[in-house]
Amino acid sequence: MTDLLDVLPAFPVEEYSRLITALENNLVTTSDLLTLDVVELARRVQLPILDLKHLITTLRSHLHESYGLGKSAVSVETSYSGPGKGNKLTLTRDGSQLAAERLLISSLDDSIDTALGGGIATGYVTEVTGESGAGKTQFLLTLLLAVQLPAPHGLDRGAIYISTEHVLPTQRLQTIITSHPRIKDLESPPSLKRVLSIQLPDLEAQDHILAYQLPVAVRSQNIGLVVIDSIAANYRAETEASKNKDMEKTRAKTLAVRSADLVKTGTLLRKIAVENDCAIVVANQVSDRFEQQMAPRWTVDTQRLPLAQEVAPDLAANKEMQDKRDNASRIPEPSQPQSSPATMSYPSSSTSSMPKRPLMTYDRPPSPTILDPRLTLDYQMRFFTGWGDDDSVDQKNLKTPALGLTWTNQIACRIAIIRESTFVPAAHDPTSEVDYSNKSMTLPLAETGLGGADWSKKRWQRWMRVAFAAWTQETEEGDRGVEFEIWSGGIRSIKKL
């Protein structure tokens, strides 16, 4: 039970020191203690059954209290009259009350806050992902200043900036302070003194600081926001180093070790966020997602096909072709009657006396996990990566957040920042009604010819969208999100005309 204090830090271990020591020697975890049969567990660790039952009862009681189901946080309802009538424990606070008590860190822009459900919520690990130059760091720098503001925009607490790639851009922070309209006119604006910074050169230093130094700093310095920029840099460096040394021989082992490290890191960050009621925001890198990696669309007309073709169209087509080849190879004899469909016929062969193996048919459909591409990870990733969830348009420039599905399971919210380039005329009438950002429209040719200097100007467009979140709904399918731009005061949304 080495994980007992991680699950329940306030558990009275002194009362059960003898039992806990025996359980730790036999590698019994808290989950095993709650799920395994108590008789089998007592035989395994050589402990009295009654003592184990008492420990399990106490453990469950503390777990109920930690989740708001204990005696001090429940109400008893006796009005229930259905099957199993009796007292029923219910939470004293419902979802709306918890939502009203949630603390949020504003982005200092009303449109972006609306898309994020009010801002960045405390008590969760939030990821901001996007390609290089999309604006991730600019968004994080704005949060470092917003957390210092009083409610409703901030928490009136400090922030910690943990960097794995570059140092804290203090000059850029000072520019935001002097340029943003909601900050520059305050009597006591945010200060750089309330932003602590540390740099993580490698994965070993990262694990040590996150496990030992960060929890102490958050408690002692009244920290409300922890920013890690970026979480994938050190993991990618370690993976590339292992590839160069051992190549493919130990690649699977390296990935397994990395998955365990990601789970450990995610557990540490979630624990810090919950225990200190602070927000942890991490930046993540992305990689290109090529079209051939995307699962094919399921376009079979299931209303016109029989059951075998509905479930497995490839198998049905192969069966039809095989039947045609078999009929062409058969030479019927005049003296023999034509065989019935249920009779198995064998082609004549002078080289082999073995009967032809009959074509296999299925009494029930094959497993859908093999045939249905909609159940593959390549297809499902469109729903949690932030790219490729709209089937109505032919999307290009698709990205996949780094660290894979293992890291996705460790976070509570993913905010995707999408950047695309748009070519516009270098000089055109601003009062014109032509929408130059519409890529589907055929633009007139430049006067200097195709590829002339008049069309060489490139403009970057950026959108922010929520892939998933624990405190708000995700951005609807087909909606790119909130368009924003980067300026001297940080980031700001672009209002649609």
Image (tube, helix red, strand yellow):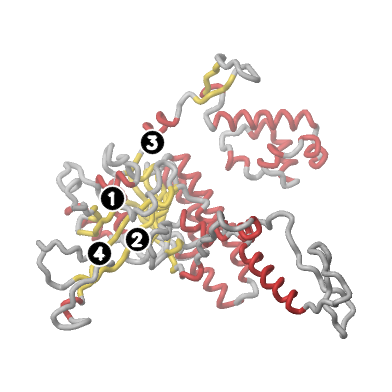
Q: Position of residue 85 (x, y in %)?
A: 63, 17
Q: Which residue is mark 1?
A: 193
Place residue 69 in its image quadrant.
top right
Query: Which is more foreground, mark 1 or mark 4?
Result: 4
For label 1, the SS is helix
Q: CA distance from mark 1 to mark 2?
A: 32 Å
**Which image quadrant: the N terminus?**
top right
**Residue at 50% over, 62% down:** 297
Q: From mark 3 to mark 4, how far is it between C-alphas?
A: 40 Å
Q: Secondary structure at mark 2?
A: strand
Q: Which mark is residue 418?
A: 2
Q: Nearer the viewer, residue 222 or 164?
A: 164
Task: Please give the residue where the numbered disc 4 appears in the rendered image.
Answer: 438
Q: As drawn, is 445 to the left or to the right of 43? A: left
Q: Earlier in the sequence, mark 3 or mark 4?
A: 3
Answer with mark 2 or mark 4, whichever residue precedes in sequence: 2
Pinpoint residue 266: horizontal percent, then vertical percent: 51, 51
* Quadrant assignment, res 282: bottom left
Q: Are marks 2 and 3 in contact (CB under 8 Å)?
A: no
Sequence-first disc among 2 and 3: 3
Horizontal placement of 301 versus 218: left or right? right
Q: Amino acid at mark 1?
A: Lys
The amino acid marked with disc number 3 is: Arg
Instruction: Tell me the mark number nearer the camera, choosing from 2 and 3.
Output: 2
Amino acid under label 4?
Asn
Horizontally, residue 290 falls left or right of residue 352, namely left
What kind of element bears circle 4?
loop
Q: Which numbered dot is residue 338?
A: none
Q: Earlier in the sequence, mark 1 or mark 3?
A: 3
Q: CA distance from mark 1 to mark 4?
A: 45 Å
Instruction: Point out residue 475 in the picture as x, y percentages from the top left corner.
Output: 37, 49
Q: Which residue is mark 3?
A: 102
